[in-house]
């Protein structure tokens, strides 16, 4: 397992919403400190595009520019059938939603050691390979 890092969609939203300021600053620091290790998935890009115009009142054009910037800055893991099958197994074993299980599966296949999320169980180790951390606790 490498030391790649995965950020759940909610953290990207705090980054671009810049609100609340304390969460924005913490996420910005995580990204700055780990920029060479960050991995993002097509799922998170889609979720981010869906939320940005609705939650932070940016235009779709601006949301496209944000997504394009992320794609040009960080490696993107496309969702494959391998991730889908592994997500189903994670869902059955750990009882996460399918979408959270897909994030976990993508992080595992992307050789991540950490998933930052405030929506999953803090400090849980999945398959002895990837740890879920809530950076706000």
Image: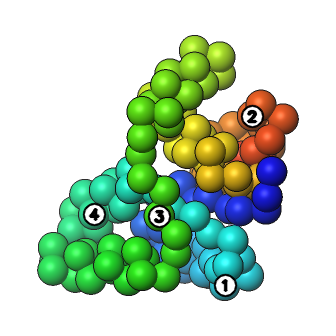
Q: Residues within 10 Å of mark 4 (few under 14, many from 20)?
A: many
- First reached walking from the N terminus: tag 4 or tag 1: 1
**Does residue 26 show up?**
no
Observer-side mark, 2 or 3, equals: 3
Task: From the image, tell me which residue sits under label 3.
Answer: 76
In the rendered image, the quadrant that contains the C terminus is bottom right
Residue 68 position, x and y percent, is: 32, 79
Residue 91 position, x and y percent, is: 55, 22
Task: From the image, tell me which residue sits under label 2.
Answer: 126
Instruction: Tell me the distance, in whole angstroms, between the alpha carbons under discs 1 and 3.
Output: 18 Å
Where residue 131 sits, quadrant-wise, is top right
- In the displayed structure, 95 sits above or below 107; it is above
Residue 63 position, x and y percent, is: 25, 75
Apparent side of residue 114 relative to residue 68 in the rendered image (left or right): right
- In the displayed structure, 43 sits above or below 29; it is above
Q: Are marks 2 and 3 in contact (CB under 8 Å)?
A: no
Instruction: Tell me the distance, in whole angstroms, between the alpha carbons under discs 2 and 4.
Output: 28 Å
Instruction: Tell me the distance, in whole angstroms, between the alpha carbons under discs 4 and 3.
Output: 15 Å
Q: Circle 4 sits in a helix, a strand or a loop, which is it?
A: helix
- First reached walking from the N terminus: tag 2 or tag 4: 4
Instruction: Tell me the distance, in whole angstroms, between the alpha carbons under discs 4 and 1.
Output: 22 Å
Q: Are marks 4 and 3 in contact (CB under 8 Å)?
A: no
**Does residue 132 show up?**
yes
Q: Are marks 1 and 2 in contact (CB under 8 Å)?
A: no
Given residues 97 and 18, the one toward you in this image is: 97
Instruction: Tell me the distance, in whole angstroms, between the alpha carbons under discs 1 and 2.
Output: 25 Å
Q: Are marks 2 and 4 in contact (CB under 8 Å)?
A: no
Find the residue positioned furthest to the right: 128
Task: From the image, tell me which residue sits under label 1.
Answer: 32
Q: Circle 3 sits in a helix, a strand or a loop, which is it?
A: strand
Apparent side of residue 7 relative to residue 129 in the rendered image (left or right): left
Q: Which residue corresponds to the image point at 73% horizontal and 82% vertical from the top-left?
A: 33
């Amino acid at each position: 397992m490498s030391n790649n890092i995965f950020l759940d969609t909610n953290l990207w939203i705090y980054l671009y919403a810049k609100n609340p300021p304390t969460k924005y600053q913490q996420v910005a620091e995580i990204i700055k400190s780990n920029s060479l290790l960050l991995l993002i998935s097509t799922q998170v890009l889609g979720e981010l595009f869906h939320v940005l115009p609705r939650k932070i009142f940016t235009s779709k054009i601006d949301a496209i520019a944000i997504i394009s910037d992320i794609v040009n800055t960080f490696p993107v893991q496309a969702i494959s059938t391998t991730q889908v099958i592994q997500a189903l197994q994670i869902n059955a074993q750990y009882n996460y939603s399918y979408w959270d299980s897909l994030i976990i599966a993508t992080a595992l296949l992307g050789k991540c050691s950490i998933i930052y999320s405030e929506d999953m169980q803090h400090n849980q180790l999945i398959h002895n390979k990837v740890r879920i951390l809530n950076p706000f606790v």
